[in-house]
């Protein structure tokens, strides 16, 4: 009889150990996916930052009177290149996105610039890079959602607490970018 009780206790301990190992590995894999997703965003942000000097050289000759716009793009790029944390990266990226929007809006006043093939190619590259950044952000948020769901539901919450794992924050759109653009005819 005692052998059966010991056997049941051992079986329960083995099951608990297997569940723990399963959740431990799942949580680690999800954390690694989050880190990889962030690295993909970082690669795209770097790619965009690397395109900026070429864009600036192309634009400089045409936009001699738009010094402030050009300086804002340069400052935003420097902030992005100097960012040390994900939050600094996000803030600098938002600043650069706004500066590029201003640059492209002002470029509408320069027909020769709009017709310049180099400018058009750079603008197209930046547009494709923006699409890749958006996709990478979406993937990051999806991965964070999976991680958060795993560590906030039962039995994952038990293992996450023991492992010291906390909920991760998703990337958010700044409040200013949520406003609908005004369209008038």
Image: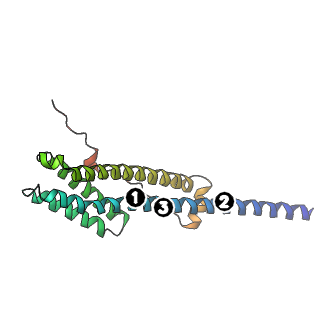
Residue 3 location (% of width, % of height): 91, 64
- Element type at mark 2: helix
Which residue is nearer to you in this view: 166 or 99?
A: 99
Name the residue that disc number 2 marks: 22
Residue 93 location (% of width, % of height): 30, 58
Identify the image's colour scheme: rainbow, by chain, secondary structure or one colour.
rainbow
Which residue is nearer to you in this view: 62 or 167?
A: 62
Q: Quadrant of residue 155?
A: bottom right
Which label belongs to residue 119? none
- Element type at mark 1: helix
- 82 sits to left or right of 115: right
Residue in the image at 44% along x and 52% along y: 141
**Reading the chain from its start, which is encountered first: label 2 or label 3?**
2
Name the residue that disc number 1 marks: 41
Residue in the image at 34% along x and 63% along y: 46
Per the model, the C-alpha gap separating discs 2 and 3 is: 21 Å
Which residue is nearer to you in this view: 125 or 32?
A: 125
Per the model, the C-alpha gap separating discs 1 and 2 is: 29 Å
Count residues near mark 1 (Cα–Cα under 10 Å), then give few for <14, some for 14-19, many for 20+.
Answer: many
Please identify the residue farthest to the front as the structure is shown: 117
**Reading the chain from its start, which is encountered first: label 1 or label 2?**
2
Labels 1 & 3 near each other (Cβ < 8 A): no
Per the model, the C-alpha gap separating discs 1 and 3 is: 9 Å
Count residues near mark 2 (Cα–Cα under 10 Å), then give few for <14, some for 14-19, many for 20+.
Answer: few
Classify the position of the N terminus by image quarter.
Answer: bottom right
**Reading the chain from its start, which is encountered first: label 1 or label 3?**
3
- 126 sits to left or right of 168: left
- Element type at mark 3: helix
Which label belongs to residue 36? 3
Labels 1 & 2 near each other (Cβ < 8 A): no
Classify the position of the C terminus by image quarter.
Answer: top left
- 5 sits to left or right of 178: right
């Amino acid at each position: 009889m005692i052998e059966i009780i010991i056997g049941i206790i051992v079986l329960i301990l083995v099951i608990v150990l297997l569940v723990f190992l399963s959740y431990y590995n799942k949580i680690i894999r999800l954390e690694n996916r989050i880190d990889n997703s962030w690295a993909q965003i970082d690669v795209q942000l770097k790619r965009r930052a690397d395109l900026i000097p070429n864009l600036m050289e192309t634009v400089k000759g045409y936009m001699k009177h738009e010094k402030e716009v050009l300086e804002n793009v340069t400052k935003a790029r420097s902030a992005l290149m100097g960012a040390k944390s994900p939050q600094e990266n996000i803030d600098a990226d938002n600043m650069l996105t706004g500066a590029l929007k201003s640059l492209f809006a002002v470029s509408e006043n320069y027909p020769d610039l709009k017709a310049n093939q180099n400018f058009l190619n750079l603008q197209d590259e930046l547009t494709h890079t923006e699409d890749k950044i958006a996709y990478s952000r979406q993937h990051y948020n999806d991965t964070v959602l999976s991680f958060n769901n795993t560590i906030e539901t039962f039995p994952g919450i038990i293992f996450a607490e023991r492992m010291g794992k906390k909920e991760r924050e998703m990337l958010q759109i700044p409040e200013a970018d949520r406003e609908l653009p005004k369209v008038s005819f």
